Image (tube, helix red, strand yellow):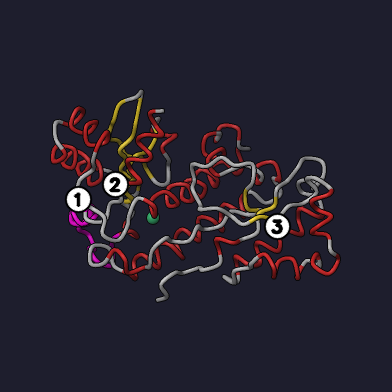
């Protein structure tokens, strides 16, 4: 497998919608949405130039005019995907963020085939089905994934479960990929280690309780290290429920669905949890911990 699954997806076109100019759900918005969806479905990354050529903008010289007509339409490169970002800009359709490391980067603890299927197929399906569920709901399409997950109660009832499951899948996995890295593992440092020691007595004590949450979650779900009311806590959620259902802010999240480990570990979820400690990105966890307490 290639070293980097979607080299150009980071450059997917983002359309900044200014209300009233590119009318949500209007023909212009639908046109750009279709372009982005096409690129996603065909797995053919569409860079800015191709997008502009396809849409006939280059020849018409509208680029310059775009700057002179503030807010009509501005295309910009997408920054690093982060489910916790709440930007004014977002892709016209939700997309799977690229892995920041090769599929085999976490070997031997998590095998390349599992990473490939998990990222491209499973996460891909959550995104596809989220986009499907939101069809015809321009107001919801315009929101960030974070806002959608925070505001599940305000989602129309007929699509709420689909958004909860598939949007949750998108939110959770977008974070999960960042919580692992090549050469990860070891122990946390600084404030996070101090917080773990205060709450759980020791790092080993924390690992034991986290493992109990991960292996004790019946069926599919996630184990979490969260900040709740300013303190660290361990919890788990069912299916693709997020930190918002758990009532905290995630510092670590471990996918305990069988699809995350079955190829290598089959029914041995405890072994998968033990292996996962070797790939944890503690720098990312420390960053989340600091943000959750600020
Ligand atoms: Mn998963």
**Spatial CA span between label 2 and label 3:** 36 Å
Residue at 50% over, 61% down: 124
The segment highlighted magenta reads 261-277
Label 1: how many residues lie within 10 Å, few (<14), some (14-19) or many (20+)?
few
CB-based contact (under 8 Å), mark 2 and mark 3: no
Labelled disc at residue 33: 3
Residue 276 is one of the magenta-drawn residues: yes
CB-based contact (under 8 Å), mark 1 and mark 2: yes
Image coordinates for residue 211, horizontal then vertical, percent: 20, 44
What main secondary structure does the magenta stretch of the protein show?
A: helix
SS at badge 2: helix
Taking 227 as reference, is 94 above or below it?
A: below
In the image, is the residue at mark 3 within 8 Å of ligand 1 by its beta carbon? no
**Spatial CA span between label 1 and label 2:** 8 Å
Residue at 51% over, 68% down: 7
Residue 71 is one of the magenta-drawn residues: no
Labelled disc at residue 282: 2
Which of marks 3 and 2 precedes in the sequence?
Answer: 3
Q: Nearer the viewer, mark 2 or mark 3?
A: 2
Q: Which residue is mark 1?
A: 186
């Amino acid at each position: 497998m290639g070293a980097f699954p979607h080299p150009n997806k980071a450059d997917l076109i983002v359309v900044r919608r200014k209300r009233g100019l590119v009318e949500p759900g209007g023909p212009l918005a639908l046109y750009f949405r279709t372009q982005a969806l096409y690129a996603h479905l065909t797995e053919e990354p569409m860079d800015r130039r191709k997008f502009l050529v396809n849409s006939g903008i280059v020849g018409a010289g509208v680029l310059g005019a775009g700057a002179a007509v503030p807010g009509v339409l501005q295309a910009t490169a997408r920054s690093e995907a982060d489910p916790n970002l709440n930007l004014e800009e977002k892709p016209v359709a939700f997309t799977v963020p690229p892995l920041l490391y090769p599929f085999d980067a976490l070997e031997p603890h998590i095998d390349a085939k599992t990473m490939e299927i998990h990222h491209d197929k499973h996460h891909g399906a959550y995104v596809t089905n989220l986009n499907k569920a939101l069809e015809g709901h321009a107001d919801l399409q315009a929101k960030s994934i974070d806002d959608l997950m925070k505001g599940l109660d305000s989602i129309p009832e007929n699509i709420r479960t689909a958004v909860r499951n598939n949007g949750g899948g998108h939110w959770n996995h977008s974070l999960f990929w960042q919580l692992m890295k090549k050469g990860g593992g070891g122990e946390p440092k600084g404030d996070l280690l101090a917080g773990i020691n205060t709450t759980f007595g020791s790092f080993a004590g924390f690992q034991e309780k986290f493992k109990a949450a991960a292996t004790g979650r019946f069926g599919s779900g996630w184990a979490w290290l969260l900040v709740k009311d300013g303190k660290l806590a361990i919890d788990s959620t069912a299916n693709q429920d997020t930190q918002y259902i758990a009532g905290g802010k995630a510092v670590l999240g471990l996918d305990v669905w069988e699809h995350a480990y079955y190829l290598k570990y089959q029914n041995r979820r405890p072994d998968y949890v033990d292996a996962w400690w070797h790939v944890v990105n503690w720098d990312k966890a420390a960053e989340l911990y600091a943000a959750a307490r600020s």
